[in-house]
Image (tube, helix red, strand yellow):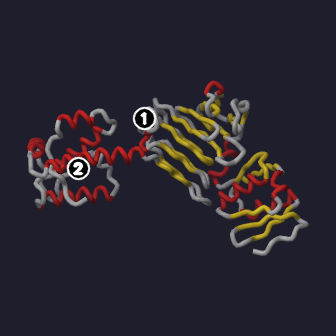
Amino acid sequence: MNGPPAGRPLPPELVAELSTHAEGQELTQVWELLAIADPVPGSPESSQVWDRINAEIAQGRPLLTPAVALAPIGATPRSRAAVAAATRRWHPAAPWAIAATLALVVGYGAWQAVPVNITAPLGEQLAVTLPDGSEVELNAGSSIEYARGFRRLGGLVAGARSIALDGEAFFSVVPSVHAFSVNTAEAQVTVLGTRFLVRSHQGEEEGTRVGVESGRVRVAPAGAEDSAVELGAGEGTFVARGARIPDAVSLVKVDRLSAWRRGGFWLVDQPLTAIFRELERRYAVDIRLRDVTVGDARLNVYYPDRPSIETILSDLCTRGGLRYSRTSRGFEITAQSEPSAKP
């Protein structure tokens, strides 16, 4: 930003146009914020104001909804009448200012249309606060995507709270008149305010697993709303890939389902290949299984606290008649009778 545009009340036709947009009030506030400064281009006072605004932006202040009008640094605060008089001034640069505001309308709308995508890096967990104050804990290698500010996007009603999930996450949802939904490749989970866990990694055969810690949630297979089931605290269900009906509601140990939140590790009746993929995400390593046929063996794994990856691999290999060795990128799993490859 080089210098502030001159300011005056917006033309009635532009005000009418802005009133048809959800962001119109905020954009009008931006214009009024700029008009508070002495609108004479190049004046020392206007330069100070612009420097102040730039400083506020750099500090992350939400200028689109200013709590108070900014005054020039070191200047005597002006009365409402003086501010109103300033907004009525007109200078030759005003056409440029209107063009700048129109550009702001277009640019801000384009920015709002870009969804937010957040991914927890491999080997790390990430806590995210959503626009409505709800909180999400992402397990390693998991990601969420949602419309910026939960605004209108792709046909959604303005204010709808909709999240797309790839991976595993624990949600603490604040109550609202707007439903909160989590969408995976297999299912849609809908709530109003509760704490629950959803697990669904795209590209894997497992499907979507849901467990509820408190409150109630509604789980429906994707495209089959009539087949939804409701879950209460301590209950869970599973939606297999391509299924039109969820599994029967069952009692679940949510503290085990969410063991990863405190560093633990728990998987139930999973093939070795799926367990190794989860270890790759959790510990940011590469695990190579030389004999893929042994990867179909299904096991239960539970560690309440954070174990080392070698502890888990040692136990898995003991139970499966396998052995592991280190490589330059991670680990290699071989059969007991098979020679291991050199790193």
Asked if residue 165 lies left or right of residue 266, the reply is left
Badge 2 is on which residue? 100
Instruction: In this rendered view, identify the residue nearer to me: 125 or 256.
Output: 125
Q: Pointer 1: residues within 10 angstroms few (<14), some, or many (20+)?
A: some
Task: Identify which residue is drawn at 79% across, 49% down.
Answer: 300
User: Could you say whether the residue bearing mark 1 is in a helix, strand or loop?
Assistant: loop
Amino acid type, residue under disc 2 in the picture: Ala
- What label does residue 227 carry, if any? none
- Mark 2, secondary structure of its residue: helix
Residue at the (68%, 34%) spot, across then down: 235
Q: Residue furthest right?
A: 337
- Give the alpha-carbon distance from disc 2 to disc 1, as whole Å: 28 Å
Q: Residue at x 83, y 60 (%)?
A: 291
Q: Outermost residue, bottom direction?
A: 342
- Residue 58, position in %: x, y? 32, 59
The amino acid marked with disc number 1 is Gly
Q: Position of residue 27 (x, y in %)?
A: 27, 43
Residue drawn at point x = 50 percent, y = 50 percent? 117
Query: Who is closer to the viewer here, 198 or 73?
Result: 198
Frontmost of labels 2 and 1 is: 2
The answer to which quarter of the image holds residue 187 is top right
User: Circles 2 and 1: CB distance less than 8 Å?
Assistant: no
Q: Position of residue 237 (x, y in %)?
A: 69, 35
Q: Earlier in the sequence, mark 2 or mark 1?
A: 2
Q: From the top left corner, tell me how far across and down residue 89 is, in percent.
A: 8, 46
Quadrant the N terminus occupies: bottom left
Q: Nearer the viewer, residue 205 or 122?
A: 205
* Residue under pointer 1: 159
Left or right: where does residue 159 sit relative to residue 21?
A: right
Image quarter where the C terminus lies is bottom right
